[in-house]
Amino acid sequence: MKKLIHFLLLSFLAGGVAAQSDVQYTHFTFNKLAFNPGYTGAKGSFDALALYRNQWSGIDGAPRTVHMNAHTPFAGQRNGMGIAVTADEIGKVSTNSAEMSYAYRIKLGESSTLSLGVSGRFEQLRIKWSEADAIDPDDPEIPQGDETAFAANFGTGAYFLGKKFYFGLSMPRLLKSPLYLDRSDRNDNPRTTYVTGGFSTSLNSNIELVPSMMLSYNPAAPVDVDLNANFIFMKTFWLGGSYRLGDSFDALAGMEFGNGLRLGVGLDFTQSELRKVTNGSWEIMLGYTFKCKSCDVSHLRFF
């Protein structure tokens, strides 16, 4: 069964996906730069993040993702710049990307900022056909040897940050990409639009509730919605949960240490038909925000 699913996953991605999409993250609320270049520099200080995702654990060839990014404001907090690298693998298909982002930050009030961002990325896709465990090795539709493609892409986004809430709108890929190796029967539409938002509210002097959401829309795919709520205790550690529409219920836990280091763990409990063959998904997040005397730490950590 695992080999059959492995082959179906490979065929799904390499030959018949209706739309190219970005990697999904359970820690999406902590990893906004992956979806929105307008977020660049929004932490108010130099910030770095590393994340590993193991999706659909137990299925041979299921997705594995490593993502790292860093960003910082400069020139009096009015500009932001960032970098990101992503390595994503599913079956014998691997996608690697390197990205740079820039945002211009407009101060709208004492505690509100609108950031307008752009990004450029270089992408590589490789399909290892030589390692494919095909049901029919003589199928003429399966290429012989490996295939590799390279492409550039661009994105844009806007991010509004208030003292107790945020809102984002972005499209991280604007161009159609040749990464899927010129298969004319596909309807490639990489233009996924992301809408994000959230706010924080104090329940008492020691507990803060931070609900957030992310909606992604692509004309060639179903609408995805992620809903999240984290309880933050003493501005130090958090417990929370998420629901990904039609896909999973997720649990999150993490801690922010006094020196700016933060560590988070996420567990996805699959609700789709894949639950019959997978143990779910999991993520580990490691981040660090450098201290700065002029930052408002009360909302800097979690937005």
Image (cartoon, grey):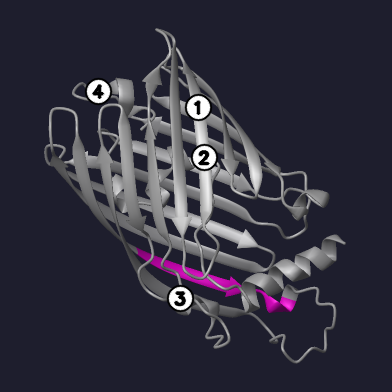
Residue drawn at (62%, 37%) of the image: 250
Give percent across and percent down for residue 200: 38, 25
| Quarter placement of the N terminus | bottom right
State left or right for residue 263 relative to residue 151: right
Label 4 and label 3: CA atoms lie apart by 41 Å
Residue bearing mark 1: 230
Asked if disc 4 and disc 1 are in contact, CB closer than 8 Å, the reply is no
Q: Locate residue 180: give its quadrant.
A: bottom right
Residue bearing mark 3: 150
State left or right for residue 282 relative to residue 165: right
Q: Secondary structure at mark 1?
A: strand
Magenta-drawn segment: 121-130
Residue bearing mark 4: 296
Give percent across and percent down for residue 191: 41, 67
Nearer-N-terminus badge (4/3): 3
Q: Is residue 120 magenta?
A: no
Numbered-mark total = 4
Residue drawn at (36%, 44%) of the image: 70
For this orientation, the residue located farthest to the top is 205
Identify the amino acid type marked 2: Leu
Nearer-N-terminus badge (3/2): 3
Nearer-N-terminus badge (1/3): 3
Identify the amino acid type marked 1: Asn
Q: Which mark is residue 227?
A: 2
Label 1 and label 2: CA atoms lie apart by 10 Å
